Image (cartoon, rainbow, N blue to C red):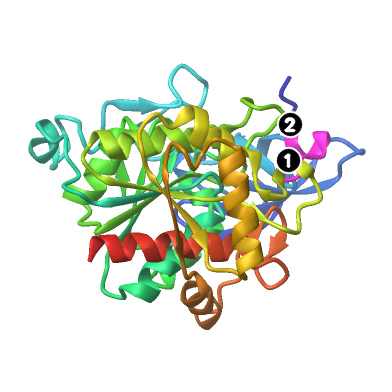
């Protein structure tokens, strides 16, 4: 069950249009002051002294990404602005919110989207972790600086795009040019009802030359073969294929993860590409030392992936170097790129391959 607490805002530390970070003193001596996040389009503005209701479930469960409380209601503040749009996300929950979906009749892009069902060969790089977006986008820009990169954020993890500091950073650095949130995810430059329409909208409306598709921060895993949201990678690859795009799979690679199921090529990648992906895609490995590449190839062979997809090797080094030049230090499973570069080399390799395919 979710845990709700009341409290008062002690101070506001960050106040953006789409995200507020504050310190809240909870009316519970066991918790005291907790960092809290509010999304103004849903809660309205937040000021010091306001009485609020916060969700502290993540804090009390000790979740890895649960160090913040989330403001549900501001009991003293003004209501959020009334927005246009008849498509509702987070449907039939207390936090349902309406948006102008890119496909909807009230959207200025409705006519473009009405009969659209093709990506016209646009490469789509599908990931299974949010952090991989940084490597893919940098890999594209290092290979093709003028390419326009679109990011489709699915609803496989965090739902508000504003929660992703990574995307905020990549956008400011010029590595991601346009965003779209699909399903129940919300807050992108474009809003889409489905992954398929989101991919198409990024190409036709957002002008993306290459699309990277991935969930927001906070993958769900259970240590089982099928119980992880990274399985959506297969669905995204199939969507790209169905729309006439060029599906490219970003491989989850790690030599720092102590969990055997994620050592080398993660079981998330192997399962998504063997079971969830029903159409043929290009699987990109990073150009590491030959014995390492041979180990990764063997994992794909043994996992039944190589028989179903085309496996290639590309250089992710320029993409990782571009991230360093821009002062961006992403982390994967709390391990920064400087300490464990392999996941980002793999992602940048996928981006480099996509850029070459687009060219």
Residue 298 position, x and y percent, is 61, 49
Q: Nearer the viewer, residue 246 or 96?
A: 246
Image quadrant where one finds the N terminus: top right
Q: Disc count in the image?
A: 2
> In the rendered view, does 167 fall on the left or right side of 11?
left
Q: Where are the magenta residues, as a range?
A: 56-65
Q: Is residue 296 magenta?
A: no
Image quadrant where one finds the C terminus: bottom left
Which residue is identified by label 2?
Answer: 223
Find out whether the residues at labels 1 and 2 contact each other: C-beta distance under 8 Å.
yes
Disc number at residue 149? Answer: none
Mark 2 neighbour density, 10 Å: few (under 14) some (14–19) many (20 or more): few
Secondary structure state at the residue bearing disc 2 = loop
Q: Nearer the viewer, residue 146 or 328?
A: 146
Residue 64 position, x and y percent, is 75, 45
Q: Residue furthest right?
A: 30
Q: Is residue 61 magenta?
A: yes
Cα–Cα span, label 1 and label 2: 8 Å
The residue drawn where x is 70% and y is 52% is 333
Q: Nearer the viewer, residue 329 or 345?
A: 345
Which residue is identified by label 1?
Answer: 261
The answer to which of marks 1 and 2 sits earlier in the sequence is: 2
124 versus 315 height, above or below: above
């Amino acid at each position: 069950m979710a845990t709700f607490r009341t409290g008062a805002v002690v101070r506001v530390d960050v106040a953006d249009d789409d995200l507020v970070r504050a310190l809240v003193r909870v009316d519970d001596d066991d918790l005291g002051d907790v960092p809290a996040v509010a999304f103004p389009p849903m809660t309205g503005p937040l000021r010091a002294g306001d009485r609020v209701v916060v969700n502290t479930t993540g804090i009390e469960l000790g979740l890895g990404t649960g160090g913040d409380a989330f403001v549900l209601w501001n009991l003293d503040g003004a209501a959020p602005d009334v927005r246009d749009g008849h498509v509702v996300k987070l449907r039939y929950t207390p936090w349902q919110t309406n948006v102008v979906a890119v496909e909807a009749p009230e959207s200025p892009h409705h006519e473009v989207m009405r009969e659209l069902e093709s990506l016209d060969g646009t490469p789509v790089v599908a990931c299974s972790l949010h952090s991989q977006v940084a490597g893919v986008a940098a890999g594209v820009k290092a290979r093709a600086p003028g390419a326009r990169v679109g990011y489709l954020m699915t609803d496989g993890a965090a739902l508000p795009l504003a929660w992703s500091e990574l995307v905020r950073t990549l956008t400011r650095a010029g590595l991601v040019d346009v965003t779209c949130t699909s399903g129940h995810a919300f807050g992108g430059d474009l809003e889409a009802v489905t992954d398929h329409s989101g991919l198409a909208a990024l190409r036709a409306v957002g002008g993306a030359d290459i699309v990277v598709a991935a969930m927001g921060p906070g993958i769900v895993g259970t240590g089982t073969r099928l119980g992880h949201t990274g399985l959506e990678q297969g669905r995204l690859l199939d969507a790209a294929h169905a729309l006439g795009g060029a599906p490219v799979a970003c491989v989850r690679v790690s030599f720092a993860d102590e969990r055997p199921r994620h050592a080398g090529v993660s079981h998330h990648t192997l399962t998504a590409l063997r079971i969830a992906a029903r159409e043929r895609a290009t699987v990109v490995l990073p150009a590491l030392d030959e014995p390492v590449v041979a180990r990764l190839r063997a994992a794909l062979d043994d996992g039944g992936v190589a028989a179903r997809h085309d496996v290639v090797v590309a250089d992710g080094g320029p993409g990782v170097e571009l991230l360093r030049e821009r002062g961006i230090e992403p982390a994967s499973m709390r391990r920064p790129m400087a300490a464990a570069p392999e996941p980002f080399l793999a992602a940048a390799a996928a981006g480099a391959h996509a850029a070459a395919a687009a060219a």
